[in-house]
Amino acid sequence: MPTRLKFVFVLIISVFLMSCGSEQTSDAPAENMEISHQSQNITIYRDEWGVPHIHGKTDGDAAFGMGYAQAEDNFGQLELGFIMGTGRLSEILGEDAVLADWVVHSFENNELSKRDYDNAAPEIKALLDGYAAGINYYMETHPELETRLLNHIEPWYSLALIRRWYYLGGFLSRLRFTTEERTAAFEAINGTALQMAQVDYPEIDPEDRKEFGSNAWAANGSKIDATGSFLFINPHLPAFGIGQTYEAHMLSDEGWNFTGYARFGYPLPYIGFAENLGWMSTDNYSNQEDSWIEHFDDPENPLNYTYGDATREAVEWEGVIIVKDAGPRKVKFRKTHHGAVVAMREGKYLSGMFATFDQPGWLDQWYNMQRSSNVEEFTKAIEPQRMNFGNIIYADRGGNIWYIYNGSVPIRNEGFDWNTAVDGSNPDTDWKGYHSLTDLPQVKNPVSYMIQNTNTTPFGVSMSESDAKEENYPTYMVREGDNARSRNARRILNKHEKFDFATWEFESLDTTMVEWNVSKPIINDAYASTSSSNSERAAKLAPVIELLNAWDGVATLESVEPTIYVDWFEGMYRSKERGAEFSDEEVIDFLERAVDRLVEDYGSWQVAWGEMNRAQRPPLDDAGNPIFDDDAESIATPGVPGWSGGSQITFNGRRDGLKKRYKTGGNSYTAIVAFPTDDNERTRSKSIHVFGASADPSSPNNMDQAAMLAQKQYKPAWLYLDDVKANAVRSYHPGEE
């Protein structure tokens, strides 16, 4: 039913029921004469930055408000996420998304998500039901809304989106199946060719964590000029698309009070803080996924694959993918006992699987974590280990800080290279259950009174004897090393004997490029060599070298040095394979290229970092990608690339046809929290978003926080209901805004 007609139909039915009710209960109390609606149980309070503080009678009511608020602020991304999560991209993007949808359905994403919804605990089902109802209510009460595909949201969509984002967007990419390998498997299983280039899944490996990822710190004891603990929440996530963040605050009369960030399509924030505790999660690279080489060597029985001394039969089934402008397309899928068969390499099929993918509980764990009030309850909440993919940095009122190398890690036999596809015909490559929480590297309340992680090794978190020891863990469990962001965190945490909250705040938005300490001697050595061999060439670079040598490595809006340094570094280090060495000639050549490019684009090599490094929230293409424009309005930002260090990070690679760098990710939702020990003292908190609460370009909350972040400023993160009410610029029931 079209949305406009649906809305009219709902109104007609409502009037009819109200009329019948008044005739049949003329002597009944007034409250029985009214037809109640769940929306009346919810009040959305918007502060001056547009952040929704959502209060409901029940937790399910609050989730209703969350769905409604997200639809208000960015319905386009909300719908696109659900389309992607349920494997329906081909219906809006056409042929080039067929392979992406095929992978989603090969892993039976929708079937598992429907099953998990049907079997969900009552409190989880209430969240999912309320959230979907809130979005649907927004659609019903806004008949002018133009949808791309979905006219009704099902409660299980959120579960499908969570699986799609973390497993099929994260773990699957770690298996390094190329688009060509996935295409080969599709064509072999289906006996038909894909005619168009396909949407690619990015590859992820541990080295990427040096550039992309997140920061988290916590401190307690003598490290802070306060009781309890301090927490720093600093995710570096995409600013656009399915991975972007949404700040929201959930409150209910059932005692729920949690604020933090969600993604569009999630019924609750999943990282943040409550009155008594909070946490940050930094992606780890723990081995929670594997691929197997499957041997289908029996031409008489093409679904038989070798396993030990016998064979097993793969499961093959049919389905339909609807393709824009082409209609329904019948496709086949295949799986072995290891997992879905979605790639082919050197003539052999490859299957893949991810830890606990086929089990429920990710959303349950998030909810139970934020409903915890102390470290004992939090421990119980995370023991199921259904939330994978990320380290946990935890802090609370009890003065506890805790790091866990979190995630369900399969127990494996040593002796195999688990970073590559293993032989599926060997039963010894099968998983043998999962490691328990106590098996994982972790440190609680270290003697240093501080912990940090930036997607790095779990063996240097506290910089003290309290850290876990590498020799105590299986070789397949941990794959991370160090990075510049960790070096910068260690520098900051160690340079202060004691943090007050103001210092914690100041350092949390630091833009020191500690990698410059590594790069500086490389440039100087190469320049010295050039001076000896070609004095004329060296003379042209002398002003640049002089400027760089006087630089302290701190990026500001006004500084010129980071503009030159970033262009040089990225031009050189992305020109070869990782770990490659460069000659003095190459070092100087790339420095000259950086200078020449700046002169060509700006007429001078002395370009301020703020002039080059910008934040812009432009129109999006059909797939949700930003279309940046040098002539459109943008905001200067001092954020630095993740490879360089810093705690205010900006993903801002150069793009063809553009002179300026535009933020595509980095600091997304950043928060600082001080948990006091005294129950009579309130938790202190501040936060800042990458852009603003609303995706509407005409909204005053579209880019208001981007301007604050550029000035290294936070806004208040109201946590208590009386503060929320006192600082609300508007409040309303859903449907009455």
Image (cartoon, rainbow, N blue to C red):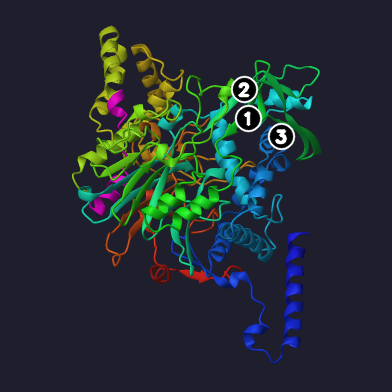
Q: Which residue is mark 3?
A: 98
Q: Which residues are magenta?
A: 500-519
Classify mark 2: residues with Cα within 10 Å, few (<14), some (14-19) or many (20+).
many
SS of the residue under disc 2: loop
Lateral position of residue 164 relative to residue 381, left or right: right
Spatial CA distance of label 1 from label 3 is 24 Å
- Quadrant of residue 638 in the image? top left
Q: Residue at x 30, y 20 (%)?
A: 523
> 298 and 57: which one is in front?
298
Q: Nearer the viewer, mark 3 or mark 2?
A: 2
Q: Earlier in the sequence, mark 2 or mark 1?
A: 1
Give the side of residue 253 with respect to residue 345, left or right: left
State the residue lying farthest toward the top. 533
Asked whether disc 2 touches disc 1, contact meaning CB atoms under 8 Å apart, the reply is yes
Residue linked to disc 2: 424
Crowd band around label 3 with a 10 angstrom C-alpha radius: few (<14), some (14–19), many (20+): many
Work out whether residue 324 can be spotted.
Answer: yes
Where residue 471 appears, as percent x and y from the top left, is 35, 26
Residue 553, label in figure: none
Q: Where residue 569 sits: x, y (%)? A: 38, 25
Q: Residue at x 59, y 32 (%)?
A: 353
- Seen at 73% across and 37% down, the residue is 94
User: Which quadrant: the C terminus?
Assistant: bottom right
Disc 1 vs disc 3: Cβ atoms closer than 8 Å?
no
State how far apart marks 3 and 2 are (Cα).
Answer: 27 Å
Q: Amino acid at mark 2?
A: Gly
